[in-house]
Image (tube, rainbow, N blue to C red):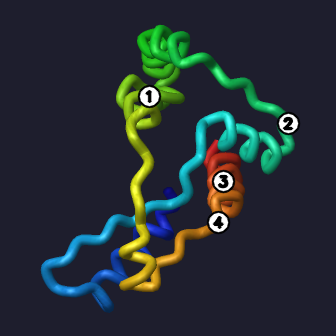
Amino acid sequence: MDVRDVAGGCLLAAERGRSGESYLLGGHYARIPELLAMAGKVSGKGDLPVMPLWLARAAVPAIGGWAALRGRRPFYTGYSLRTLTGNGLFSSEKARRELGYAPWELEETVRDMVMWLQRAE
């Protein structure tokens, strides 16, 4: 989900939302291989590898240790894996209908995220 969608959706809810109502603000659903393909294309790095989930889970301690030695954040954590594999299918239709909520296009979000990460390196 794009942080711009969260901020914009919160403003829309404050301006147009009905008292006592709740609104789900979601982006576009995509699987990790799809996101990596978009990121690879945008970054110019081509196809990015997709690690099997069982291997990613097994590597969590090593990745965390390596990041700690380097004084950096780990590339991913056990929590981030649980979040990525949880149920991400929910509807923002009510927010779209009642608030005029419209999330950014996924490709644009991925492009901007890749550019931000490249600048942060």
Label 2, secondary structure: give it: loop
At 63% across and 54% down in the image, what residue appears?
Answer: 113
Question: Residue under circle 3?
Answer: 110
At 22% across and 86% down in the image, what residue appears?
Answer: 18
Q: Amino acid at mark 1?
A: Leu
Measuring from the top left, give residue 84's x and y in whole percent: 46, 36
Q: Answer yes or no: do the residues labelled 1 and 4 have beta carbons within 8 Å?
A: no
Q: Is residue 7 left or right of residue 33?
A: left
The label nearer to you, 3 versus 4, is: 4
Q: CA distance from mark 4 to mark 2?
A: 21 Å
Question: Residue under circle 4?
Answer: 105
At 86% across and 43% down in the image, what residue appears?
Answer: 44
Label 1, secondary structure: give it: helix
Please report whichever mark, 2 or 1, sits nearer to the chain's N-terminal start.
2
Q: CA distance from mark 3 to mark 2?
A: 14 Å
Please report whichever mark, 3 or 4, sits nearer to the chain's N-terminal start.
4
At 76% across and 30% down in the image, what residue appears?
Answer: 48
Within 10 Å of the Cα at label 1, are there few (<14), some (14-19), or many (20+) other Cα atoms?
some
Question: Residue under circle 1?
Answer: 81
Measuring from the top left, give residue 71's x and y in whole percent: 47, 26
Q: Amino acid at mark 3?
A: Val
Above or below, comparing residue 109 to residue 57 in the picture: below
Above or below, comparing residue 89 to residue 104 in the picture: above
Question: Residue under circle 2?
Answer: 46
Q: Amino acid at mark 4?
A: Glu
Within 10 Å of the Cα at label 4, are there few (<14), some (14-19), or many (20+) other Cα atoms?
few
Q: CA distance from mark 3 to mark 4?
A: 9 Å
